């Protein structure tokens, strides 16, 4: 686990934001550009597992292939020592989990069935046009009905 003040490449760790099965997420500062970022770290013990490493890389590629105001921007995928990391834009505010724990409904589909249909259509488009595994950004798109 990293501590505030620790360095990872040109990023300085500020605080832990969360932990999960694929590693830890920290708030950090990009020393070169002077901006706050979020950095997801796949620890060395997980980076040696080829399946987890491939899943980690695929996550970064999938997100970076999308451009939408509600999807964060990937700045970099890199390595430092034995650890792998993904540097992304930092979005300040409450998480979905925090909102749900407070009883706030993220989407009230009973009031706006048309919006729910639109959301499902958007998610279908994202899924239908997701990059094939191993393909570069913008290349080899497939429709969800293809094998």
Image (cartoon, grey):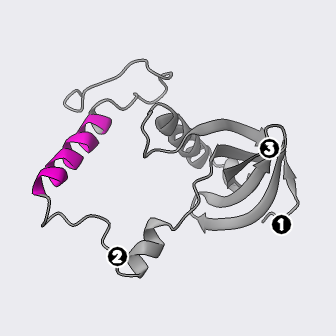
What's the residue at 83%, 37% (across, down)?
32
Of residue 106 and residue 18, the one placed in the foreground of this image is 106
Residue hosting label 1: 3
Sequence-wise, the earlier of marks 2 and 3 is 3
Residue 138 position within the rendered picture, expressed as x and y whole percent measured from the top left: 44, 20
Quadrant assignment for the N terminus: bottom right
Q: Identify the magenta region.
A: 113-126
Q: Residue at x 36, y 32 (%)?
A: 130
Q: Above or below — where is 16 with respect to 119?
A: below
> Dividing the picture into quarters, in which one does residue 30 lie?
top right
Residue occupying the far bottom of the picture:
102
Q: At x 45% / y 71%, what residue is drawn?
A: 97
Rounded to the nearest angstrom, the CA distance separating label 1 from label 3 is 19 Å
* Residue 16 rendering spot, x and y as whole percentages: 71, 66
Q: What residue is disc 3 on?
A: 34
Q: Residue 104 — which label?
A: 2
Residue sticking out furthest to the top: 139
Classified by dominant secondary structure, the portion drawn in magenta counts as: helix
> Which secondary structure lies at badge 3?
loop
CA separation in Å, label 1 and label 2: 32 Å
Q: Nearer the viewer, residue 68 or 21?
A: 68
């Amino acid at each position: 686990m990293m501590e505030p003040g620790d360095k990872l490449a040109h990023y300085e760790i500020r605080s832990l934001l969360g932990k999960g099965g694929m590693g830890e997420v920290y708030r950090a500062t990009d020393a070169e550009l002077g901006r706050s970022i979020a950095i997801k770290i796949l620890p060395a013990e997980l980076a040696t597992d080829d399946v987890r490493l491939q899943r980690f890389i695929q996550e970064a590629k999938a997100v970076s292939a999308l451009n939408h105001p509600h999807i964060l921007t990937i700045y970099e995928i890199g390595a430092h020592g034995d650890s792998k990391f993904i540097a992304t834009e930092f979005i300040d505010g409450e998480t979905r989990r925090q909102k749900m724990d407070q009883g706030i409904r993220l989407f009230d589909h009973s009031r706006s069935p048309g919006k729910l249909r639109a959301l499902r259509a958007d998610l279908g488009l994202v899924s239908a046009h997701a990059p094939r595994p191993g393909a570069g950004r913008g290349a080899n798109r497939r429709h969800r009905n293809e094998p």
